[in-house]
């Protein structure tokens, strides 16, 4: 019974691969991040903004003779975030404000990201095709850097404090006694982060084995960057960097793909064998 099941699966895989085409190629693009903070009251204290960042890597597509394709990629992604204090936060508590100091915090985080998308292709027989795609994304947080400007830092005679993210597995007691200048200690990170992507795009086919793809995706982040009670920024005593947010992104990418057609390859082998026999 097991042998028959293996045989059936093998026949199905061979049948699918015979009609399949594999694509691989470089991919580059940009993304704009919009953080969704868990603490909604933070909106009264800080204005958040993000510049357009970039990503680059390699993309893989699996297409069939039908309108269905599977897409994945492995890319490096750079994401920044900036928080600046509002007038309410800069107003002292004694005067009805939220803090009483100026804050300008810039962070840059680095990821390896890999979505897995189910793709539906329209106008399959045309040189220019349209596509719709949906699927999950996994991202691994490699690390990051930051620059912090506050009245508190000015008071120590410095204009700003620059730091690097350092991941450490610490207990609450160890965290409370940790002081490493120039480091943002993160003891409860979500280094493996999940998101759901959906988007649209266009395929420009130049030949049976080459094509370019332009796609626009929106990524809904599911995971927090890290939990606040596991963070320590040694260069700031009053301000605390808020890492409890979901990362939503608008991602625009361009890729150039090289194709490998299994059917054409097999036909080529068969033709060469016939020529050899005739000789």
Image (cartoon, rainbow, N blue to C red):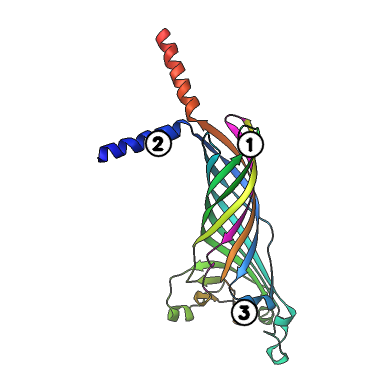
First in sequence, mark 3 or 1: give its number: 1
Quadrant containing the C terminus is top left
Left or right: 13, with 84 as reference point: left
In 3D space, how far apart are the residues under numbered discs 3 and 2 (Cα atoms)?
A: 57 Å
Residue ID at (62%, 58%): 249
Q: Residue at x 67, y 84 (%)?
A: 98
Looking at the rendering, which quadrant does residue 1 occupy? Answer: top left
On the image, the x and y values in percent for residue 184 come to 55, 71
Q: Is residue 45 visible?
A: no
228, 219: nearer the viewer: 219
| Residue drawn at the location 57% of the way across and 54% of the way down | 197
Q: Is there a contact, CB below 8 Å, between mark 3 and mark 2?
A: no
Give SS at disc 1.
loop
* Residue at screen point 48% across, 78% down: 178
- Residue 239 — which label? 3
Residue 273 % position (x, y)? 42, 16
Q: Which residue is mark 1?
A: 123
Nearest the viewer among 159 and 65 is 65
């Amino acid at each position: 019974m097991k042998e028959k099941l293996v045989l059936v699966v093998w026949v199905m895989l061979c049948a699918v691969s015979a009609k399949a085409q594999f694509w691989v190629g470089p991919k580059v693009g940009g993304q704009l991040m919009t953080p969704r903070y868990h603490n909604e009251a933070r909106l009264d204290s800080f204005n958040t903004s993000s510049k357009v960042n970039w990503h680059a890597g390699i993309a893989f597509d699996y297409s069939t003779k039908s309108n269905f394709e599977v897409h994945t990629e492995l890319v490096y992604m750079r994401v920044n975030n900036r928080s600046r204090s509002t007038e309410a936060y800069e107003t002292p508590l004694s005067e009805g404000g939220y803090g009483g100091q100026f804050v300008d915090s810039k962070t840059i985080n680095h990821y390896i990201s890999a979505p897995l998308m189910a793709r539906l292709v329209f106008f399959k027989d045309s040189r220019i095709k349209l596509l719709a795609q949906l699927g999950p994304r996994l991202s691994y947080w490699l690390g990051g850097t930051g620059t912090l400007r506050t009245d508190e830092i000015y008071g120590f005679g410095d204009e700003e404090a620059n730091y690097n993210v350092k991941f450490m597995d610490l207990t609450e007691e160890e965290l409370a006694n940790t002081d490493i200048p120039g480091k943002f200690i993160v003891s409860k990170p979500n280094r493996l982060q999940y998101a759901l992507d959906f988007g649209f795009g266009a395929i420009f086919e130049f030949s049976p084995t080459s094509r370019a793809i332009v796609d626009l995706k929106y990524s809904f982040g599911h995971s927090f960057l890290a939990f606040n009670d596991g963070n320590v920024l040694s260069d700031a005593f009053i301000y605390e960097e808020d890492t409890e947010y979901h990362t939503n992104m608008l991602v625009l990418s361009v890729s150039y793909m090289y194709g490998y057609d299994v059917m054409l390859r097999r036909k080529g082998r068969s033709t060469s064998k016939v020529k050899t026999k005739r000789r």
